[in-house]
């Protein structure tokens, strides 16, 4: 990846009632995209209308910000109508050719801004009939996601929850090819992204009996670099910590914290075997606070240190550890 390339800034505006899971997935997916292709750099930014902060570390949106490559509105079924200033901002972005998107109820905001004449959009199933009645100028589809590109303008839309990851992979395929999109889906733990014809707005995926467990697993996969506390994972998927622990014990025979650590270590192992990043960079990118922390956790899991993993099991001189910020 060429650091001299200009950034494609992607704003994710999380409105009250919007899906944190959708926003987290988009943030992580766009961040990982930088490591999967060399032609373009992306900078995802989580935005809010208030003071920001919270679990997703959002910052307030400024009224004069128009330098976005893409701008996605993440809203819920009951989100309040957009303020006139935000509608004007969306119209300004559309005039500049910015890719716009609506996640969950976010497409309703695009409609309020008058941007949907004749365009195809997806939204949460519960909103479709209302949207067809209130905004007949658009074509509202009962699809999982939609990408409508015409006359140099692109609109992205999808249901809430994990549908945002399927939409992201489809968009990446249109920008960088199917190979990059498939690599991104694998990096996000999806196996493969679902096509637009997949029905329903829920987060369920094959392989797990509980939708809440599926959401929690996706949330962990999307936050390997900055692991979330178990309490935050539980809160984001709408269960108590004890309920989450019961789900993991019932279906995976482990605790959430143990599974989360395993995910981070497995990713670190892949990077050690396949990437040219330094050992310290890999440790930090997988959520370990220091070289020694990473080394100790890795050895406890796999029986050898990250340095030995990379060298095929043959130790290097102690100076190499110091160069990577590790100790034996």
Image (cartoon, grey):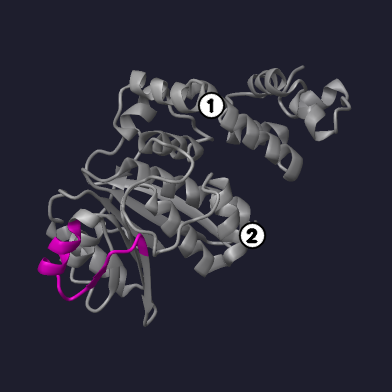
Q: Which secondary structure lies at badge 1?
A: helix
- Identify the residue under disc 2: 38
* Left or right: 282, with 7 as reference point: right
The Cα atoms of the two marked residues, 1 and 2, are separated by 31 Å
Label 1 with label 2: CB-CB less than 8 Å: no
Tell me residue 43's x, y (percent).
47, 52
* Left or right: 78, with 143 as reference point: left
Quadrant of the image containing the N terminus: bottom right
| Quadrant of the rendered image containing residue 54 | top left
Task: Look at 48% across and 20% down and name the residue there.
Answer: 255
In this view, 20 is above or below 201: above
| Quadrant of the rendered image containing residue 301 | top right
In this view, 204 is above or below 126: above
Tell me residue 264's x, y (percent).
58, 31
In this view of the protein, which residue sits in the foreground, 83 or 311? 311
Task: Say which mark, if any, is on residue 259.
Answer: 1
Confirm whether residue 56 shows in the render.
no
Crowdedness near tag 2: few (<14), some (14–19) or many (≥20) residues, C-alpha within 10 Å: few
> Does residue 142 belong to the magenta stretch?
yes
Tell me residue 193's x, y (percent).
49, 56
Q: Which residues are magenta?
A: 127-145
């Amino acid at each position: 990846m060429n650091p001299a390339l200009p950034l494609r800034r992607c704003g994710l505006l999380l409105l009250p009632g919007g899906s944190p899971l959708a926003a987290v997935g988009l943030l992580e997916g766009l961040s990982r995209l930088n490591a999967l292709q060399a032609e373009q750099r992306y900078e995802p930014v989580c935005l809010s209308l208030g003071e920001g902060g919270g679990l997703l570390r959002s910052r307030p949106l400024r009224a004069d910000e128009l330098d976005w490559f893409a701008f996605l509105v993440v809203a819920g079924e009951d989100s309040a109508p957009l303020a006139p200033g935000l509608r004007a901002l969306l119209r300004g972005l559309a005039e500049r050719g910015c890719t716009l998107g609506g996640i969950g109820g976010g497409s309703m905001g695009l409609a309020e801004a008058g941007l949907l004449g004749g365009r195809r959009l997806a939204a949460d199933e519960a909103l479709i009939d209302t949207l067809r009645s209130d905004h007949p100028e658009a074509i509202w589809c009962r699809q999982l996601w939609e990408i409508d590109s015409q006359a140099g303008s692109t609109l992205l839309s999808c249901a809430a929850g994990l549908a945002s990851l399927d939409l992201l992979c489809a968009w990446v395929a249109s920008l960088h090819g199917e190979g990059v999109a498939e690599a991104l889906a694998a990096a996000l733990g999806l196996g493969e992204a679902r096509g637009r014809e997949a029905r329903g707005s829920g987060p369920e995926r094959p392989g797990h009996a509980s939708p809440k467990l599926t959401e929690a697993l996706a949330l962990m996969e999307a936050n390997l670099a900055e692991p979330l506390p178990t309490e935050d994972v539980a809160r984001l998927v709408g269960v108590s910590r004890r309920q989450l622990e019961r789900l993991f014990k019932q279906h995976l025979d482990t605790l959430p914290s143990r599974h989360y650590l395993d995910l981070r270590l497995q990713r670190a192992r892949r990077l050690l075997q396949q990437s040219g990043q330094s050992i310290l960079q890999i440790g930090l990118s997988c959520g370990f606070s220091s070289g020694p922390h990473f080394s100790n956790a890795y050895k406890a899991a796999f029986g050898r240190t990250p340095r030995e993993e990379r060298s095929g099991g043959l130790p290097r001189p102690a100076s190499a550890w110091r160069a990577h910020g590790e100790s034996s």
